[in-house]
Image: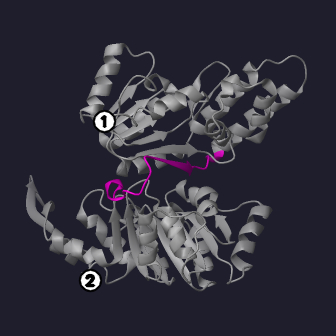
Amino acid sequence: MRFKVKPYQHQLDAVLRFQYEEYGGLFLEQGLGKTKIMLDIIANSQTRHTLVLAPNGLHANWYHKEAPEHFPDDYCAYYWKGKPTSKKAKNTLRYFLDTFDNSIPSFLFMNVEAIRTKDGLATCIHYLRSRTKSLLVVDESTCIKNPKAQVTKTCFKLAEMVDRRFILTGTPMTQGPLDLYSQMKFLHEKAPGCRTWTAFKNKYAIQEQQYAGMRSFTAIVGYRNLDQLTETLKPFTLRLTKRDCLDLPNKMWQTIHIEMTADQKKIYKELRDHALSELSFGGTVSSTLPLTTIIKLQQICSGFVVDDNGKEHELPCNKIHALLQIARSSKPLVVFCSFRRNVKQVSKALSEVYGDDKVVEYIGGMDQQARTDARNKFQKGEADFIVCTSAGAKGITLTRASTMVYYSNTYQLETRLQSQDRIHRIGQTENCHYIDLVSPGTIDEVVLEALNNKEDLSKMVLTKLVALIRQS
């Protein structure tokens, strides 16, 4: 078998199990490498062409990080950024779709929302119809849990055009067992064990007629036959948690690449180019200017910009969507942010989904009692999310969580290292999983690389800081 990166035992076992299967579901908890497993399955089978549908932003992570790191063969790939408008972009897509060698593996990475559009769907259909030995992957497959949704119905149609189908998620049931029906049907028409959604619901849901004034409706009040449902799933799914995988190291690292929105890209380029022009003009410049520029570029990557009057303006940012995907399968969760504005953005997004009482903040400016109360509420299980700035990097224990997300990174090495130890300390019984949300080709990557190399940007000389800005 061929592996670009040696698999852990649980990953190897999964590849051996699904290597030649027509369909399957990888229900693996966050951090167990289900994306690597999927790529290893493809590399060690007869599949030559793969369409990957993932939530917006995460499809870029397959393209920028996962495939280059884990797919062992030469391949060609295209990832969807929306309908191409320039002549160059149109030619690039046309070349990918029409000029190919069946002996060379290819990947089309698309955000699942795009198949609701005429151009996105047409691209998928063109790609699949022109190729043989094809496979369709739906990542975070609860995006097709609603059997009546347009995205779900379209996925069913695309599934008819491929030889193999796989779904990936750490949380196959976000609301209840009925979430499984359309995910199973996507894999194979007979997989649910029931011909229709109504039959599936009648078999596994306890329904009760209820009344609201003069109006009556059928409500689901519980579930039944779940042992039978589990047995139905067993032949074609794999469910693993971190607790099941004793071969994993104590600390695990993951970088998720999240594309910036069009607004972010425009403002980012303008600021970077202006700063480089100033820095190249000549004269005496201290290291303060490039360091300030780095911070401003980070702010844009994380979803806001500060104008000349010091007023903050929010920008559309795909990192929020990625964070919510992680939160669904990784509660309790610690989120670190470099900027207070990010803390407010993250707290608001999590509160809208899980409620205000499930989210606490730990930031500078809070009095000590408020900080203590926030930490205690999290550690006792009263809150599932704690969102911190560098104030939470030292002196507190957050071992109730085993997953930590860096929504925006500090450029100070000590703060980064100290923050990691909030969940990795005496009292922790789980493997610790650290996730960096990074906008590819930006200062995000530059800062993370410096931290991984144990470099502190605040201690760098002027020329090195300017070089880092040029890299972004």
Badge 1, how many Cα within 10 Å: few under 14, some, many 20+? few
167 sits left or right of 107 in the view: left
404 sits left or right of 319 in the view: left
The quarter holding residue 102 reads bottom right
In the displayed structure, would residue 440 be above or below residue 367?
below
In the picture, the quarter occupied by the N terminus is bottom right
> Where is residue 274 drawn, in percent x and y?
79, 31
> Where is residue 58 drawn, in percent x and y?
53, 55
Q: Which mark is residue 157?
A: none
- Sequence-wise, which precedes: disc 2 or disc 1? 2
Badge 2, how many Cα within 10 Å: few under 14, some, many 20+? few
Q: Is residue 79 magenta?
A: no
In the picture, the quarter occupied by the C terminus is top right
- Give the extent of the magenta segment: 241-262
The quarter holding residue 50 reads bottom right
Q: Residue at x 57, y 64 (%)?
A: 110
Nearest the viewer among 71 and 226 is 71
Q: Residue at x 65, y 18 (%)?
A: 309
Q: Residue at x 66, y 72 (%)?
A: 73
Q: Is residue 252 magenta?
A: yes
Q: Nearer the viewer, mark 2 or mark 1?
A: 1
Q: Amino acid at mark 1?
A: Gly
Q: Which residue is under mark 2?
A: 195
Q: Please, what secondary structure does the residue beneath circle 2 have?
A: loop
Q: Residue at x 41, y 57 (%)?
A: 247
394 sits left or right of 214 in the view: right
Q: Which residue is under mark 1?
A: 427
